[in-house]
Image (cartoon, helix red, strand yellow):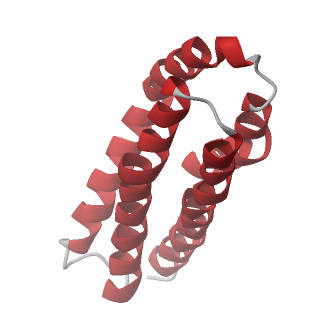
Amino acid sequence: MMSGIIWFIQICHYPLLGLVAKGDVPAYIYRNRVLTAYIVSPIMTVEIITAWLLVFMPYIHVTLGIRIAGVAIVTLVWCSTLFVQLPTNLKLQRDWNEKTFRHLLRTNWIRTIGWSLRVLIAIDIIRQLSSF
């Protein structure tokens, strides 16, 4: 789910932020952050919990390496969200500038690539479980 959401954000949502009238940016970013959190927070929470649970399930017939890769990527995505995207959004909300906006667009690729890799990991997990 997050892979689809993040591609929408990367290709459509964040670039359109640059078209919001500068005086409307603070309110727009605030409302956007709150409303987006309603959608992505539960999904991200389930994802990180299940990723960690998979690591500690020795009886599951999925290679440990792929389980560790999955938890590493989801942890990286969370760190990027909490320590890069969120602070950058807050900075833009306080004081819009093009340099910070470009930073938001550029660094969001961390999450876009991460969640795309998670799709490949999920496919491999399904492949491994279906061949058991």
Vertically, is 126 above or below 91?
A: below
Which percent across, then down, holds residue 91? 48, 35
Q: How many marks?
A: 0
**Left or right of residue 56, residue 8 in this image:** right
Residue 5, by quadrant, is top right
Residue at x 27%, y 52% (from the top left corner):
49
110, 2: nearer the viewer: 110
Vertically, is 70 above or below 48?
A: below
Which part of the image, by quadrant, shows the N terminus?
top right
Residue at x 66%, y 58% (from the top left corner):
106
**Left or right of residue 86, residue 32 in this image:** right
Vertically, is 98 above or below 26?
A: below
Vertically, is 56 above or below 128?
A: above
Which percent across, then down, holds residue 129? 45, 75
117, 99: nearer the viewer: 99
96, 38: nearer the viewer: 96
94, 14: nearer the viewer: 94
Which part of the image, by quadrant, shows the C terminus?
bottom left
Which percent across, then down, holds residue 104? 60, 48
Which percent across, then down, holds residue 67? 35, 76
Residue at x 31%, y 85% (from the top left corner):
64
